[in-house]
Amino acid sequence: MSVGIEEMAFYTPALSLDMVDLAKARHEEPDKYTIGIGQTTQSVQPNYEDVVTMGVNAAMTFIDRVDREAIEMLLFATESSVDNSKSGAIFAKNFLGLKDAIRAIEMKQACYAGTFALMQAKDFVTLHPDKKVLVIASDIARYGLKTPGEVTQGAGAVAMLISADPKIATINDDTVYMTVDEPDFWRPIDSDIALVDGHQSTDVYKDMFLKLWTRYQAASGLALSDFDGWAFHMPYTKMAKKALDQILPEVDEEKQRLFKERLADAQYYNRHVGNLYTGSLYLSLLSLLGRADGLAAGNRIGLFSFGSGAEVELFSITLTDGFQEVIDDQGLRERLAARRSLSMAEYEAVFRDQRFDSKDEQPTDAPEATNNCQFIGWKGQYRQYRIANK
Ligand code: CAA
């Protein structure tokens, strides 16, 4: 029996910022941001989007063509939680019209939790092949105005349906993982911005990738030449290149060229959206599957998941016949193209105008005419949402 990804979709807010504008405003060379770090634009989160709205909006893309009764679990991965007690999964379960006889829970370990959710889903479906699990990975990468991390901000969510009918890809039984205690990135409970030592984080990422890759080869008996492409967690797109470059000499020049081309495909949407923490690896996968020429059923794709702090997992998937028809690459491109590009003044105003204070009952800027799920503000310190069908 094969278990894997049946459906997969991405959502990002409708606002963006050009990295050339940001570089100029911060007195940096634009090439540093666009080439040195590898980011072109970033999605900007307005005050009516949060991890619940983005996760719901991603899953709404496919939920109506799925048998909701078969969805037995909703796993919600985030490090940008909206509540210290109540799970975002419960809000999402309600807005997506899922049954009450369901397990719904939120999980956190920096950017890694989406992969933990995926693996839990795979194990559950292996035991219960008639059931499906909805995985949502939703986050807002927020480092702060005029910080070194500002160029690597972003926001968005990826939703995946895991089942024994993997129309996109089978998740292979080859995963290896590793956890070490590193102080590279964290967010104190009383802070709305992440704290990071970006250079240390990059070193940890590269080092843990290499260690896992060595273990993966020994355990699986596979070599780099057995792969057809890679997707990576990408805090910024150059980071993935730094990891992959370490192992490229293991294959001949022709295969190196192929991996480089496909890495550019796997970086493309991340370059235009920015970091989305838990969802970043899966946006990279969507980018690769939607853009790479010549990918075919049976191809093996490597995935490297990284969560600061630090926890990593490396595994592979095998593509299913017809995966291109299930991935809505056209829709993804249209959504990115439709974002409104903000001026620097607008971006800074949007960045500051958030509703972190639960006693502030000023409504958000949620536009009326939309079918999307929106956060409309606080009432009695409880979050209020609006969605067309609720
Ligand atoms: N033209 C081209 N390239 C240029 C250039 C120019 N004019 N000027 C500089 N560059 C290059 C540099 O040579 C350098 O390239 P290499 O890394 O290949 O050497 C690159 O641009 C960046 O330059 P710096 O290192 O000097 O830049 P910086 O000190 O401002 O730091 C950064 C860059 C580390 C990415 C910083 O933006 C940062 O800290 N970002 C936060 C992102 C991060 O590290 N995230 C990791 C954890 S977050 C995550 O997703 C995990 C999780 O679990 C939460």
Image: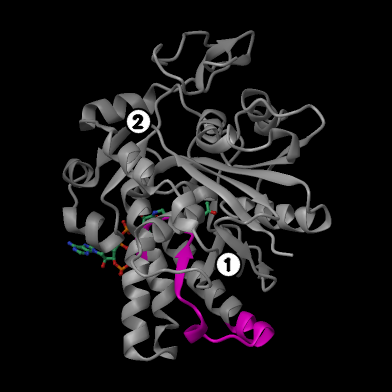
- Vertical relation: 44 (above or below) 117: above
Residue 232 part of the magenta-drawn span: yes
Front residue of 101/263: it is 101
Q: Is residue 142 visible?
A: no
> Which residue: 18% across, 58% down?
31
- Residue 235 in the image, given as x and y percentages of width and height: 43, 55
In the image, which residues are magenta? Answer: 214-238
Q: What residue type is labelled 1?
A: Ile
Q: In which quarter of the image is residue 343?
A: top left
- Vertical relation: 94 (above or below) 36: above
The mark found on residue 354 in the picture is none
- Residue 122 in the image, given as x and y percentages of width and height: 72, 57
| Ligand 1 located in image quadrant | bottom left
Q: Which amino acid does label 2 sit on?
A: Ala
From the image, tell me which residue sits under label 1.
Answer: 317
From the image, tell me which residue sits under label 2.
Answer: 14
